[in-house]
Image (tube, rainbow, N blue to C red):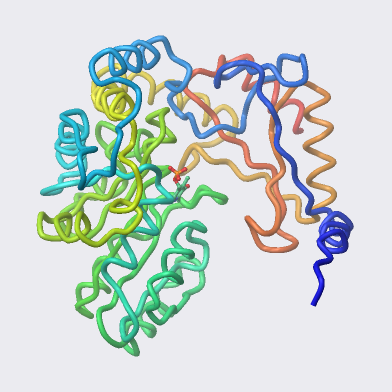
Amino acid sequence: MSWDLQSDIDEWRSRGLWRSLRELESAQGPVVRVGGREMVNFSSNDYLGLAGSEFLKQAMHEGVDLHGAGAGASRLVCGTQAAHVKLEEALANFKGAEAALAFASGYAAAVGTLPALLGSGDTVILDKLVHASLVDAARLSGATIRVFPHNHLGRLERLLQGARGRVLVVTESVFSMDGDLCPLEEIVGLKDRHGAWLLLDEAHAVGVIGPQGRGLAAKTGLESKVDLQMGTLSKAFGLNGGYVAARCEVISWLVNKARSLVYSTAPAPALAHAALASLQRVAGTEGDQLRRQLWQNLELMAGRRPESAILPWIIGDEAAAVERSRALAEAGFLVPAIRYPTVARGAARLRITCSAAHQEAQVRSLRKALM
Ligand SMILES: *Cc1c(COP(=O)(O)O)cnc(C)c1O
């Protein structure tokens, strides 16, 4: 068979699904420059406004001064530096777990962790709306994949009853395209009753929800019940990287078996240094102040108290969502349309995210533009 990429491209375009990269000409922040224009940015996951902050820039400089630029090797060879070890101790403490392991990204954490723990003969049970990294990780593991409708406890229970081998339930605390939460207590009850493990991805909860921004497991006091707490350093922490927190034996096993860790160069130690500084800020009184600002902005934007910092504005039709986003861009707002395959066909939406760094007037003006 010959290659005919062009007809695939044409088809993708004709369905309104074509995307391209947008270049920012400024640092990440509540106002960014795009195509020579200043735009108010309601599309980043930089919930606390740390990514472009003087504080984190300083921490990165410091990290480079202390540890150099590159890690030079994978973690198991000679790429582990003090910055990685300190970050992992702090992450474990922050997540109320015995130990933690830092990865190059949240994606790498997912695709490293699931295949290390599960294989053929085992079962992974996913919420229908979990992030693509977890779907890919489940596929890569070779375990039997079962999917339950979003947050549907009855269907989850039935899948648990029929599952074979080691059984892992995978869900998220804040769902990345809908901004709603999982019923964590009920899910923990179910997985415990069936002797299964639970992986909870806290990517969008950390920094935003729970005491000190420690996430939904901390908010509900269930940290010790969640077998694998996964997260990322690339959202509220304002950097790059991912992590898993768990019992010591699980983390040591991952050090041996997670291929995205073993066969990939360690994250730059300067990043790990800055991530520790970011974590301390997020968990401290400055973090509490930033969270207060963030939640004020969210309430103003949503007109009520939302569940998370992600506010979906459902439109449905892919082309209509793109057109709405384009019109908002003309008015000076960066609010990208999210469409298939990131969300289901016909469920296209604007995905509005607020940051602690937005001014009240910026939030009010987007609200007005949407009404
Ligand atoms: C962003 C995200 C990831 C991936 O994290 P990266 O650090 O960006 O690779 C994983 N899971 C969820 C739910 C996410 O939103």
The percent coordinates of residue 190 (x first, y second) are 27, 74
Q: Quadrant of the N terminus?
A: bottom right
In the rendered view, would you say 348 is above or below 74?
A: below
Q: How many marks?
A: 0
Viewer-side residue, 177 vs 72: 72
The percent coordinates of residue 104 (x first, y second) are 37, 42
Report the side of 5 relative to 352 (left or right): right
The percent coordinates of residue 154 (x first, y second) are 41, 79
* Residue at x-position 10% and y-position 60%: 249
The percent coordinates of residue 217 (x first, y second) are 26, 50
Which of the 4 quarters of the picture holds residue 59?
top left
Report the side of 161 relative to 238 (left or right): left
Viewer-side residue, 89 vs 141: 141
Q: Quadrant of the C terminus?
A: top right
Report the side of 317 relative to 285 (left or right): right
Which of the 4 quarters of the picture holds residue 207?
top left
* Residue at x-position 43% and y-position 51%: 107
In the rendered view, would you say 262 is above or below 203?
A: below
Report the side of 134 relative to 343 (left or right): left
